[in-house]
Amino acid sequence: MPMINVQMFEGRTIEQRRALAKELTEGTCRALGCTPDAVQIVLTDIKKENWAEAGKLFSDT
Amino acid sequence: MPMINVQMFEGRTIEQRRALAKELTEGTCRALGCTPDAVQIVLTDIKKENWAEAGKLFSDT
Amino acid sequence: MPMINVQMFEGRTIEQRRALAKELTEGTCRALGCTPDAVQIVLTDIKKENWAEAGKLFSDT
Amino acid sequence: MPMINVQMFEGRTIEQRRALAKELTEGTCRALGCTPDAVQIVLTDIKKENWAEAGKLFSDT
Amino acid sequence: MPMINVQMFEGRTIEQRRALAKELTEGTCRALGCTPDAVQIVLTDIKKENWAEAGKLFSDT
Amino acid sequence: MPMINVQMFEGRTIEQRRALAKELTEGTCRALGCTPDAVQIVLTDIKKENWAEAGKLFSDT
C-alpha cells in the first residue's frame, strides 16, 4: 500500500521502466512517508489505436 | 476529465475503435456538458480465456 | 461485455448519471454491434483534490 | 454484480484460469450471498518487467 | 501478486468483507499455487446510482 | 498521456496529496521524457476495512 497503476503508450524501453519504477516509488515515499517495500506499481502498455482524446484515436492524430 | 476505461473482447476492427471513441466522447459531452478535449478513453482488449461469468471462462462457453 | 469504467469529477446530478448511462450504452451498441444488456457501466466520482494534471491538484487550479 | 479484476503474472495455464474463475465466483457467492451469474471476472496478465515492488521491476529481482 | 480489485454494491457488512477477503485469498492460492501473503485485495463500494446495465442505473430498476 | 491511478489508505492530508501529485508527475517526466501537462493522476482513498493482504482486512491487523 500504495498500489500504483500506470497506463502509458507502448514502446518504452526496459531502462525507462526501471527508471519509472524507481522514480514513482521514491517520490511516493517522500510524499507519503511510507517505505519502498509498501509500494507496488503495475505498468500497462497501451497501443495508440486504443487511446483516444477529443473523440479521436491517437493512432489517427 | 472524464477518463473512460473500456474492457471489451479482443478482435474489434480499427473502424469499430474509431466509432466507439467518437460515440463515447460525443455521448459523454451531451450527458455531462463537458468539451470533447476533456474526454480521454482507453480501450482494453480482453481474450475470452481471460473473462469469466458465472464461474466459467467465455472461451469455454 | 463491454465493461465501462468512468472516472469523473464529483457533483453530477442523478439526471446526468441517467443520461450518461443511456448515451454510453447506446453509443457502444452502435459502435460494436452488441446488445444493451451486455453493457455494464460503473461511474466513479472523484474529488478535485484527488485529480491532478501537470503536477497540480484540480482543487488548486 | 460484483465485478472482479485480477492482475497476475503472465504465464498461467488455461486450467489455472478455469480454476481461478470457479474459485473466485464460488467464494464470492459464499461470502456475499449473490448468485454465480452476477459475478464477472477479468484476468489481466502482467509481464514481470511491468510489475515493480520496492522500486524494482520483478524482472530484475 | 496477484492484485484483486472487487467492485460491489455498497452496504456489505464487515463480516462479509472479512469472509470475502478470506475466500478470495484462499481460492486464489488453491488455483494459482501462490502464498496468501502474495495476494492483495481492494474492495470498492459502488452506489446503485453509479452502476448501470442495459442503459439503466440500478437505482432505477 | 501517462494516466496514473493511485490507491492508498484514506486519511492523507491535502499537503500530502499536493506533494504526491508533484513528485509522481516530475518523476514520470524524468523517466519517460514526457511533459507535465501530459500526466494525469487520480488518487483513490481506501478504507482499511476495504484492503486485505494474506486474507485479512487491514482494519483487523
Image: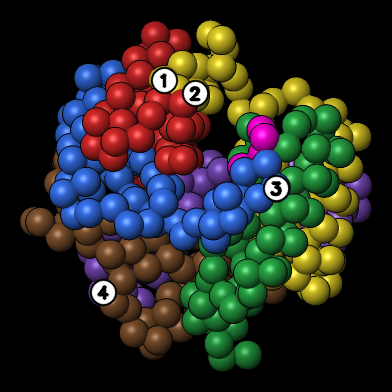
Chain colours: A red, B purple, C brown, D yellow, E green, F blue
Q: Which residues are magenta?
A: E37-42
Circle 2 crowding by C-alpha within 10 Å: few under 14, some 14–19, many from 20: many
Circle 1 crowding by C-alpha within 10 Å: few under 14, some 14–19, many from 20: many
State which quadrant residue D40 falls in.
bottom right
Q: Which residue is mark 3?
A: F55
Left or right position of A7 against D11: left
SS for callout 2: strand
Labels 3 and 1 within one chain = no
Question: In the rendered image, is residue A9 in sight?
Answer: no
- Where F48 sits versus E38, above or below? below
Residue name at image x 19 percent, y 54 percent = F14
SS for callout 4: loop
Labels 2 and 1 within one chain = yes
Residue name at image x 31 percent, y 71 percent = C10
- Where B21 sits versus E47, above or below? above
Measure the alpha-carbon separation of dots 3 and 4. 43 Å
